[in-house]
Structure formats: C-alpha cells, structure tokens
C-alpha cells in the first residue's frame, strides 16, 4: 500500500507540486497522466524519495522519510526516463546491477540466472554480450527495465508487496514492445505487487491501468478507474484541447488502437 | 575458460588479467631492485639474506647491501605505493564524476595538494613551527591531503548539479582552481629562502629520487589504507555509473559514499604529491587501458589499476634513471610525454563526451 497525503514539492523557490493525495493498493497498476510540465515526474520523484517534499508518504505503512536506502531498495525499484552511461558496460553488467542489494526474492541460487530471464522477458534474448552504449534508445530502455525487474523479481517478499515505479516506460518503444512492457507491469500487479507508471498514451492507459491519476498544473485533477476519469470534459480541460472519448475519426482515416492487438 | 563464460560476462577475463598483472608487478619489482647506476647485485644481497653462511663478509657485499636496502628498496616500495595510489585515485575519481577524463592531476586536485605541501615547506620553519612539532613527518602529507580535499570538494560543488556532473564545467573549473592554487603557490615560492627553494624545486619536478624509509613511513600508511578501502567502494561506484538517483534506488547511501570516496581520493593524492611531487597522467592512462581490456566493473578495475599503476611507474622510473645516465630525468617528464599524447587520443576518440 502506498499512501501519500498532502504532498507538495518545491524546487528552489518554485512550487512544482501542490497538496497531492495519492493512494494505491497492491495488485493494481496505477497510471499517472497529464500534459507536459504538469508535475508527473516530479511527483514520482517525491514518491521514490529522490526529492524533498512536505506532507507524508508511506509505503507498506512505513514512513518514506525514515527508510534507509537499502530498505527502500528492497521494497521498490525505479525505472528512470532515460539513462546515459559514460563507461562501456555490457548489457549483462548493467542488468546485474539490479541484484546489487541482494533482495531479488528469487529462490536461493537462482540469482545468477535472473539477468538472462529478465532480458528474455523484455524481448532482448541474445543481447547480454552487446555494449549498452551501442543500443538504440528503446533497447536501452528495455535493458534498464530488465535491471529493475531483477531488483524486485518477486512481487511479494516476506509477505509484503513490492512496487515498480516506471517513468514513461514505453515512451521510446514500438507498439509491440509497448504491449510487452505493459503486460509485464500488469503481470507484476496480478502476482501481488504494485505498479506506478507515468504514461502518455491514453489508449494504453485505458487498457492497462486499474486506476488513473490525472495531474494538471502541479495538482491532482482527478483520480479513479479509467471509466470514471476518462471523460470528454476532464481530458479536454486538462490537456487544453477539445477531445472526445470513444469518437471515431471522420471519413476513412485509418486508426490503430493497442486494444486491437491479438484480436 | 573464455568460451564457457556467459555472453557479456567479463569477470573471468578480469580475474585472469589481474593474475597476469600480479606477475608483471613481481617482475618489475625484481628488475628495479636489480638494476641501477651502481653494479650492486641484488642477487648477492638476497642470497646473503637467505643463506648467511654463504656470505663472504667482504666490504663489497656490505656496500651492495646498503645500496639495495637503503637506496633501491625504498625507491621501489615508494614507486609501487605512488603508482598504485595515482592509478586508483584516478579510477575512483572517474567513477565518482561518471567521466573517463577525470583525474586528480588534470582537474586541479594535485595542485591543491601541492599548495598544501608548499605551505608546509615554506612556512614550516616559522609560522607553522608548532604544527610541525606536533605532527612531525606527517605534517607534509596531512597538509597536502587537506589541500587536495578542499579542491575536490570545491570541484564537486561547482561541477555537479542535481546529481549530474557536467564534464565541461568540471574541466574548466579544474583549470580555474589550478590557476588559483598555482598563483598562491607562486606567492609562497616568492617568499621562500634559498634552502627552501632547493627543496621546492627538487620536490616540484615530480620524482622518486630521494626516496627514503622516512618518506615511506610518512605516506605509506595513508596510501595503504586507501588501497584497502578502495575495493569496498567498487559496488557503489558501479551503481553510480547509472547516476546518483538510480544508485540510491539500488540501495546505495549515495551521499555518505561520495564523502568517503572524495576523502579517499584526496588522501591518496595528497600523500603521493607530498612525497613525489606532481607525477601526472598515471591516473588517466592506467584505468583507461584496463577498461578497454576488462571493462569498467570497478570490482576488478580498482585492484587491476593498483597493480598496473605500480608496474608502470616502476618502468617509468627505470627509464628516468637510465635514459640520461648517470644523471636522472624527473619521472614526471616521462609520464607526461607518454600521457599527453594518450590523453589527446582519448579526446579524439570520445569527443562526444564533452558535449554531454
């Protein structure tokens, strides 16, 4: 369970996030959506303990502010938007860094095989020996996800749920890999963990999110199930352009929805 | 062995390389002990030491013993310590700044340490007399340590914003700090008397000449301590390659770790500079070559750097002793004439890094 109460974040003199309440239960995929600059990433960085905040944030009833970094690392893993490296690490060496804390939750002796299994899950079989710096942006993003998966391989550890925080996990991916990654997130939640993901694609959000948090100008504009939140009025106001939920394009303009995959 | 290793896993190769480097260091140590301006025979000395009954007790073997024990041995030990310290502090600093171009010599840390040392050499007889009385032979390395520490902290402050280090800012700040410490050092040199000037010149050239057991006693413990601590920094340095925030998410107490790493770099650099002056480029060349060979995993890179740094400095010292024999070339000239072009080569290959 993640509970945030009245969270505000200021960077310098500028207030970025104001009075946000946020609740999510294990078993759920929670999506944070909103226009550019609405404070999504800043709020996620407060949830991960990266930025100082006022208000309170608790993970599994532990106050985030009092968690040591190794304790937090055993409870949640964080995927940043993009990670650049200045040293020539191989893909395997990067993924193995996820095992640094030693709390993957895999069976004893299985840790050595996790990097290969994680790479396989993100559709990067055979990439272990490649140099990270030579991969495309989307491939790098999936390598980082494999690392994050190694860190919290078991969604539940010692009877307590664990969490994935994903900052735009599918932003640089093609549609096949968007679906693969979102299915990994859903699977993690179904097996008892929790996922908080910043997403831009509203169709993908509607398809995979159990709960949607809509950010607008540093505040929470709405929270609830996709059916409750995705209304013409709300998204038109938040995204500041006239939008209609479920409307089909006029004439014979083709459109492709992720929901059609596998139909 | 290589074939069985999983793709992308270079740990077997790294361990093998470290083994080779151990042998290499052993050989360079033996070679350095056995060679020198005099014809003193290290073999004779070792034989006499192992089998005293074989000793002929002649004056010649006594002379050989003095040359090997009191001239060559301290110089070899100091060379090993300094070479290891320079290479490891280079590697740690590169990890800390997430940047293969960071080096204590290049970004002004050595100049800061040098300023600390010059303060002691020039003011030791007068203003700092009481301090010298308290800390004895450790005054010089301690002063160099604090000089290096102050510069490193300042540099990190200037070059790092929100956990990201700007390479251009770091190098430019290093130039500014180098100029500032150079100016302060210049004022002190201006104040120095003739005897102090001789000391300064001798020290400033960067040389292992004049290695004594006293110098080893002054700098050795600090360097050995840093070398012992460095393997414990390796995992955190690896995580830090992904950025400060991610290292924290992986469970590394980043702030505390950075403090330890900065103190370690300043201590090793300070101790080296205090006893051997400015020997440059070892900290850049050694880790860079090793990364090409075994990859950037600091668990292997740090010990390998210590070994190769020690070997390389002994070889450079051997060259400096023989190339213009019976005179000596300061070792700093050797390392700079190899390291300068090498550094340009890295720059040409990685020009993109500066635009990060």
Image (tube, rainbow, N blue to C red):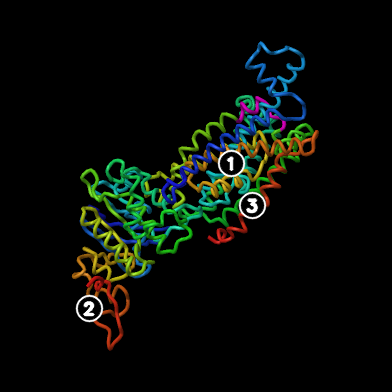
Asked whether, in this view, residue A225 is left or right of residue A44, the answer is left
| Picture quadrant of residue B320 | top right
* Rendered image: mark on residue B343: 3
Q: Between disc 1 and disc 3, whose residue precedes?
A: 1
Q: Nearer the viewer, residue B23 or A146?
A: B23
Q: Residues within 10 Å of mark 2 (few under 14, many from 20)?
A: few
Question: How many labels were placed on the picture?
Answer: 3
Residue B239 in sight from this viewpoint: yes
Select label 1 or label 2 by which is in front: 1
Q: In the image, residue A208 lies at what x, y percent?
A: 24, 65
**In this picture, is A8 found above or below A102?**
below
* Rendered image: mark on residue B345: none
Residue bearing mark 1: B87
Instruction: For marks 1 and 3, give the CA distance.
Output: 15 Å
Q: In the image, residue B172 lies at what x, y percent?
A: 61, 55
Residue bearing mark 2: A246
- Magenta residues, as a range? B209-219
- Identify the chain of the residue marked 2, using the numbered disc in the image: A
Please tell me which residue is depicted at 60% across the width and 53% down the height of the picture. B171
Asked whether, in this view, residue B6 is left or right of residue A249, the answer is right
Q: Secondary structure at mark 1?
A: helix
Q: In the image, residue B44 lies at what x, y percent?
A: 70, 20
Residue B146 in sight from this viewpoint: no
Q: Secondary structure at mark 2?
A: loop
Is B60 contained in the magenta span? no
Q: Nearer the viewer, residue B66 or B277?
A: B66
Q: Nearer the viewer, residue B55 or B316?
A: B55
């Amino acid at each position: 369970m993640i509970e945030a109460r009245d969270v505000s974040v200021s960077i310098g003199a500028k207030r970025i996030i104001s009075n946000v309440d946020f609740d999510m239960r294990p078993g759920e995929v929670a999506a944070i959506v909103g226009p550019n600059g609405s404070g999504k990433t800043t709020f996620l960085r407060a949830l991960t303990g990266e930025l100082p905040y006022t208000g309170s944030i608790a993970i599994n009833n532990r106050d985030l502010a009092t968690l040591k970094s190794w304790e937090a690392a055993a409870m949640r893993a964080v995927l940043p938007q993009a990670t650049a490296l200045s040293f020539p690490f191989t893909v395997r060496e990067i993924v193995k860094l996820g095992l640094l804390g030693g709390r993957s939750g895999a069976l004893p002796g299985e840790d050595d095989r996790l990097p290969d299994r994680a790479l396989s899950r993100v559709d990067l079989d055979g990439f272990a020996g490649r140099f990270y710096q030579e991969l495309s942006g989307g491939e790098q993003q999936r390598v980082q996800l494999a690392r994050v998966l190694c860190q919290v391989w078991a969604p539940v550890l010692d009877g307590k749920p664990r969490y994935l925080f994903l900052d735009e996990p599918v932003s640089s991916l093609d549609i096949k890999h968007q679906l693969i990654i979102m299915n990994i997130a859903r699977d993690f939640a179904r097996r008892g963990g929790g996922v908080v993901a910043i997403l831009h694609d509203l169709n993908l959000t509607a398809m995979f999110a159990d709960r949607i948090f809509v950010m607008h100008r540093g505040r929470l504009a709405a929270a609830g199930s996709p059916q409750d939140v995705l209304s013409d009025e709300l998204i038109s106001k938040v995204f500041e352009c006239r939008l209609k939920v479920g409307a089909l394009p006029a004439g014979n303009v083709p459109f492709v929805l992720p929901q059609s995959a596998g139909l | 062995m290589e074939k069985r290793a999983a793709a992308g896993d270079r740990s077997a190769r790294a361990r093998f390389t470290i083994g080779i480097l151990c042998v290499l260091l052993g050989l360079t140590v033996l070679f350095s002990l056995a060679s020198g301006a005099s014809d003193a025979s290290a073999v004779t000395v070792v034989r006499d030491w192992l089998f005293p009954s074989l000793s002929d007790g002649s004056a010649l073997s006594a002379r050989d013993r003095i040359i090997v024990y009191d001239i060559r041995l301290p110089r070899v030990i100091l060379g090993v310590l300094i070479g290891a310290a320079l290479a490891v502090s280079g590697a740690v600093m590169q990890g800390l700044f997430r940047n293969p171009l960071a080096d204590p010599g290049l970004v002004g840390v050595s100049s800061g340490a040098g300023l600390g040392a010059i303060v002691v050499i020039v003011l030791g007889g007068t203003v700092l007399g009481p301090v010298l009385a308290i800390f004895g032979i450790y005054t010089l390395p301690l002063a160099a340590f604090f000089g290096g520490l102050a510069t490193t902290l300042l540099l990190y402050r200037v070059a790092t914003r929100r956990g990201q280090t700007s390479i251009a800012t770091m190098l430019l700040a290093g130039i500014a700090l180098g100029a500032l410490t150079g100016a302060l050092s210049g004022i002190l040199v201006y104040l120095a008397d003739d005897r102090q000037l001789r000391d300064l010149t001798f020290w400033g050239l960067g040389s292992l000449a004049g290695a004594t057991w006293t110098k080893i006693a002054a700098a050795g413990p600090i360097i050995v301590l840093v070398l012992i601590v460095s393997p414990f920094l390796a995992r955190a340095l690896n995580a830090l390659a992904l950025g400060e925030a991610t290292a924290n998410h992986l469970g590394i107490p980043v702030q505390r770790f950075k403090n330890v790493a900065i103190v370690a770099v300043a201590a090793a650099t300070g101790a080296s500079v205090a006893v051997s002056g400015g020997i440059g480029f070892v900290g850049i060349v050694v880790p860079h070559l090793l990364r090409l060979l075994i990859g950037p995993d600091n668990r292997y890179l740090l010990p390998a750097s210590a070994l190769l740094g020690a070997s390389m400095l002994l070889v450079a010292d051997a060259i400096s002793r023989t190339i213009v024999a019976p005179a000596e070339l300061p070792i700093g000239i050797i390392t700079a004439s190899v390291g300068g072009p090498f550094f340009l080569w890295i720059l040409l290959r990685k020009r993109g890094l500066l635009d990060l």
